Amino acid sequence: MKKHIDTASAFIVGLIFGIGLIFGGMTNPAKVIGFLDIFGSWDPSLAFVMGGAILVGVIAFRFAKQRTTSFVGGAMHLPTSNDIDKRLIIGSVLFGAGWGMAGFCPGPAITSLGTGNPKAVIFVVAMVAGMAIFELADRYWHQPRRANAQ
């Protein structure tokens, strides 16, 4: 029963999030690229969407830090690290470059799949391929090395 409640609540929250992305204009790549084009014909309207999202996030995390379980009874797993390392910087640069070139970030791209947007399909396929390549490379780089026996 608990698993069904967790699944239903995750679906409802995801649905509300997706609807918010659509109404906020985040699923329109032209609008996103217009927002990111600060030296061209800048469209600041998404700043209000992002500002609202940041405000909601700050308030939600403040309350979440005081809890040990979620509202549906699951364990709370909040980030604990504040480290800025090479992986974070490289990931941020790649995320920003992809966002600027395509006009999508992961949430809006997945939401746009529901509309059948071909650009969203290409973006999500490329995103999943990039995640798979990273996972394989990360495993390779972190596997124990054997000394060459000669």
Image (spheres, rainbow, N blue to C red):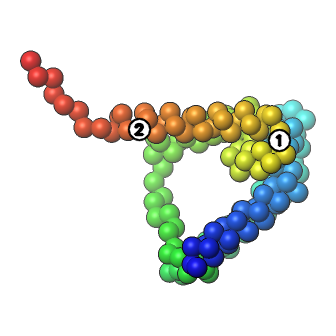
Quadrant of the frame with the N terminus: bottom right
Up the image or down, 65 lies above or below 146; here it is below
Name the element at disc 1. Answer: loop
Q: Nearer the viewer, residue 129 or 99?
A: 129
Bin the neighbour count of mark 1 within 10 Å (Cα to Cα): few under 14, some 14-19, many 20 and up.
Answer: few
Residue 81 can be seen, yes or no = yes
Amino acid type at circle 1 is Gly
Q: Nearer the viewer, mark 1 or mark 2?
A: 1
Q: Residue at x 80, y 34 (%)?
A: 118
Q: Nearer the viewer, residue 142 or 114?
A: 114
Determine the residue positioned at 48% across, 58% down: 82
Residue drawn at point x = 35 percent, y = 34 percent: 141
Residue 3, position as x, y percentages in the image: 57, 73
Identify the residue at horizontal 16%, vertical 28% (top origin). 147
**Residue, disc 2:** 138
Q: Which mark is residue 116?
A: 1
Which residue sits furthest left? 150
Q: Earlier in the sequence, mark 1 or mark 2?
A: 1
- Left or right position of 42 against 127: right
Q: Quadrant of residue 17?
A: bottom right
Place residue 51 in its image quadrant.
Answer: bottom right
Q: How far across and down, in percent of the image, does residue 108 sit?
A: 76, 49
Q: Are marks 1 and 2 in contact (CB under 8 Å)?
A: no
Above or below, 66 against 28 in this view is: below
Give the amino acid type for the residue marked by disc 2 in the picture: Asp
Left or right: 79 in relation to 22: left
